[in-house]
Image (cartoon, helix red, strand yellow):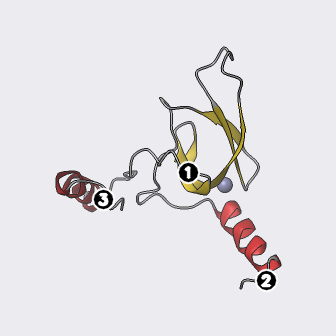
């Protein structure tokens, strides 16, 4: 759970988890470059995303940044539609496998 949450928010999230619900940790930090996160519009699981490219500022859509997942999905995110912390959502198995394989091929097993 996000350590920056207030005790009140932590208690609320804990209640949600105990009730059998799924809760995210809220928007990821602006400094996010790669890692497990929930995309508001992509699936019901957390994927391993990384930043791909920034869309021009005059783009018709509000999105400002394209992110891609290890399992091959690409989707825009923006300040108003950020990636969310994983919370207690499960991880995408495909991303998980690719991440493990990537770590092995870099020799850091
Ligand atoms: Zn995935």
Q: Observer-nearest residue: 75 or 21?
A: 75
Q: Position of residue 57 (x, y in %)?
A: 66, 21
Q: Secondary structure at mark 1?
A: loop
Q: Position of residue 39 (x, y in %)?
A: 55, 43
Residue at left 22%, top 54%? 6
Circle 3 residue: 17
Circle 1 residue: 32
- Categorize mark 3 by other alpha carbons within 10 Å: few (<14), some (14-19), many (20+): some
Q: Secondary structure at mark 3?
A: helix
First in residue order: circle 1 vs circle 3: 3
Note whether 5 is above or below 43 in the view shown.
below
Circle 2 residue: 107
Q: Observer-nearest residue: 102 or 88?
A: 102
Residue at left 31%, top 56%? 4
Determine the CA span between mark 2 and mark 3: 37 Å
Q: Which mark is residue 84?
A: none
Determine the CA span between mark 2 and mark 1: 24 Å
Left or right side of 43 for 72:
right
Residue at left 63%, top 18%? 61
First in residue order: circle 2 vs circle 3: 3
Q: How many marks?
A: 3
């Amino acid at each position: 759970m996000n350590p920056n949450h207030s005790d009140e928010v932590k208690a609320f999230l804990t209640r949600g988890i105990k009730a059998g619900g799924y809760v995210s940790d809220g928007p990821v930090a602006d400094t996010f470059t790669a890692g497990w996160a929930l995309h508001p519009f992509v699936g019901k699981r957390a994927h391993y995303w990384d930043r791909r490219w920034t869309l021009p500022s005059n783009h018709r859509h509000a999105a400002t940044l394209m992110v891609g997942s290890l399992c091959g999905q690409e989707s825009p995110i923006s300040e108003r539609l950020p990636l969310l912390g994983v919370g207690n959502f499960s991880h995408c198995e495909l991303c998980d496998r690719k991440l493990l394989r990537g770590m092995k091929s870099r020799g850091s097993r």
